[in-house]
Amino acid sequence: MKPTILLFQFSKPQSMKLMKAFMPLKLKIKNVHTEDILTPIGTLAGIKDMKTLDSTEESQELSDPMIVFAGLSNTHLDLALAAVRKSGVGPVPYKAVLTPSNQSWTAHELLEELKIEHEKMHQS
């Protein structure tokens, strides 16, 4: 799998700003469209031989934008996070790294988990 950044639910102007910010990193950037939301994250990131689920469910947009970093080295991840901050799209609270645990999840499942973690981190 080639190091990839998956962008979910960003407006076209936001997506363009992020792509411009990521350009110097020479990584694969993929805008995930609504019709692909139910595809496992690992498949979207380019993992071969991932089992895809046959779902009769209709794809629905995510409630919030999300970024998934797949296969990036620690250095590239640090640079990509810095690029997000400098891009001008504003805060992106929902970011994740692809792991063996979440690679079979859909974007909806991953976003819900990130929301739970975000809420726990920001409780006072």
Image: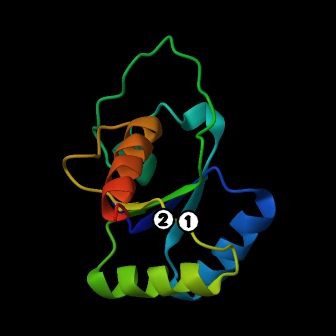
Labels 1 & 2 near each other (Cβ < 8 A): yes
Is 74 displayed left or right of 33 in the figure? left
- Res. 49 in view: yes
Please name the amino acid that badge 2 sits on.
Answer: Ile
Relative to residue 102, is residue 109 drawn left or right? right
Instruction: Identify whether 71 is placed above or below 8.
Output: below
- For the N terminus, the quadrant is bottom left
Please report the residue visible at 80 percent of the width from the left and 66 percent of the height from the top.
13
Q: Residues within 10 Å of mark 1 (few under 14, many from 20)?
A: some
- The amino acid type found where label 1 is placed reads Ile
As drawn, the residue found furthest toward the top would be: 56
Q: Position of residue 93 (x, y in %)?
A: 50, 64
Farthest front residue? 124
Q: CA distance from mark 1 to mark 2?
A: 5 Å
Disc number placed over residue 5 in the picture, else none: 2
Rendered location of residue 114, percent (x, y): 38, 51
- Looking at the image, which is closer to me, 102 or 92? 92
Residue at x 35% of width, y 60% of height:
123
Height in image: 118 above or below 32?
A: below
Residue of label 1: 29
Residue 35, percent from left and from top: 62, 32
Q: Residue at x 44, y 45 (%)?
A: 111
Which residue corresponds to the image point at 31% horizontal and 67% vertical from the top-left?
A: 71
